[in-house]
Amino acid sequence: MIRTNGRTKAVYDIVYSSEHVNGVVDLWYRQMLGRPAITAEVTSSANALWRGGTVQQLLTRLVPSDEYLASRVRFPSLG
């Protein structure tokens, strides 16, 4: 039988695994920018999350990016 502290460690190990954190980063790049994150973006963003950063902070970096704005903001044609 697994004791509570064992379950807590198991959950922690899954949530903070490189596979999960990298997947979270890639998910948000796909959602916000419409493309997978490249290796350097995954590495940088995953490291920020492991150091205590939040998904909200990741999104705060993506939303004002030129890439996001170019894909989301459409201006009506003039003329």
Image: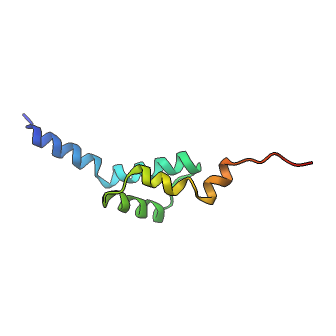
In the picture provided, is 18 more to the left or to the right than 40?
A: left
**Picture quarter with the N terminus:** top left
Name the residue furthest right. Answer: 79
In the picture provided, is 7 more to the left or to the right than 39?
A: left
- Residue 34 x/y as whole percent: 59, 48
Q: Residue at x 44, y 59 (%)?
A: 42
In the picture provided, is 29 more to the left or to the right than 57?
A: right
Say how the picture is coloured.
Answer: rainbow
Q: Residue at x 59, y 58 (%)?
A: 65
In the picture provided, is 26 more to the left or to the right than 54?
A: right
Name the residue furthest top. Answer: 1
Q: Is residue 14 above or below residue 47?
A: above
Q: Residue at x 17, y 42 (%)?
A: 8
- Residue 28 x/y as whole percent: 48, 48
Q: How many numbered circles are shown?
A: 0
Q: Which residue is drawn at 22% across and 43% down?
A: 11
- Residue 29 x/y as whole percent: 51, 51
